Amino acid sequence: MRFTLAIGDFSRATHLSVKTLRHYHQIGLLEPAEVNPDTGYRRYATEQIPTAQVIRRFRDLAMPLEAIHAVLRTTDPRARNALISAHLSRLEADLARTQNAVASLRDLLDHPAAVAPIEHRRVEATQAAAISEVIDIVDALLWYQGALGELRATLAGQGVPAAGPAGGIYSNELFAEERGQATVFLTVQAPVLPVGRVESLTVSAVELATILHTGPHEVDLDRAYGTLATYVTDHALGVDGPIREYYLIGPTDTPDETAWRTEIGWPIFETGQRDDHHQAPSVQ
């Protein structure tokens, strides 16, 4: 004889609410052992308690229901372990981002006015291979990584060497409206044949106030932008135009994130100054 529990008793046994159990039934994650065809009352077998406990622990680890479903359906231990391992890796990445954010906040509170140089320099017009698209700002980092990889592969395929570090041009709308034009480019000394998203582009000349950001883009890049904006505003130098970034050292150069260097350029009017150094609050 099979012993079963009413949904209320099963809820108490597993610490899963009745509402949650009904939802799990609807999506096929944890189906009752019996459902009365007349009343719709659900009953659960005692053998289902361990499964419910596993589900609850996965949910405590923020595993999506679809992923839990896949784990429970999988009979191959190696495949099941791979699914669990992938989620644990995502948790570790989330933890690393949280730790970086905490460290950044503490540094911001403890060192709000350290010193970093701001320079003025003019960038001359140059030929480049580029990818330009309208993107959402939440996708900017992944889009940049994919576009840069495509650019490098295209140049390698055509035997055209890059003539300098990669750069990016980002419209004001991308920041203000969270969607706008983004361009990633590599300067070249020989013509590039358009392939896929890659096209030839003349990167226009511009006068910039620049600051150097150290480390990955996810950590404190906004502080560099804020420092630069403060300097340009305080000196009444700003003009309309997109932000530029130059990726002087990045993932393709070294896996050491602390060695990455990104130059951020804010467009300013012609000052007649070249490579003048100014002190501003640090972002490093």
Image (spheres, rainbow, N blue to C red):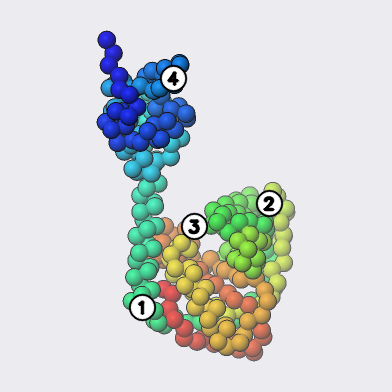
Instruction: Specify which label sits upstream in the sequence, 4 or 3.
Output: 4
- In the displayed structure image, the side of residue 47 where residue 25 appears, left or right: right
Which numbered circle lies on residue 252?
3
Q: Residue at x 55, y 56 (%)?
A: 138
Instruction: Specify which label sits upstream in the sequence, 3 or 2.
Output: 2
Alpha carbons under labels 4 and 2: distance apart: 60 Å
Q: Residue at x 63, y 81 (%)?
A: 238
Circle 4/circle 3 CB separation < 8 Å? no
Which numbered circle lies on residue 56?
none
Residue 63 visible within the image? yes
Name the residue tied to disc 4: 39
Q: Residues within 10 Å of mark 4 (few under 14, many from 20)?
A: few
Name the residue tied to disc 2: 197
Tell me which amino acid carries mark 1.
His
Q: Quadrant of the N terminus?
A: top left
Name the residue tied to disc 1: 111
Instruction: Specify which label sits upstream in the sequence, 1 or 2.
Output: 1
Q: Nearer the viewer, residue 180 or 122?
A: 180
Up-down: is 85 above or below 131? above
Alpha carbons under labels 4 and 3: distance apart: 63 Å
Alpha carbons under labels 4 and 1: distance apart: 66 Å
Q: Residue 196, position in %: x, y?
A: 69, 48
Up-down: is 66 above or below 95? above
Alpha carbons under labels 3 and 2: distance apart: 21 Å
Q: Residues within 10 Å of mark 1 (few under 14, many from 20)?
A: few
Q: Secondary structure at mark 1?
A: loop
Q: Mark 3 or mark 1: which is in front?
A: 1
Instruction: Specify which label sits upstream in the sequence, 4 or 1.
Output: 4
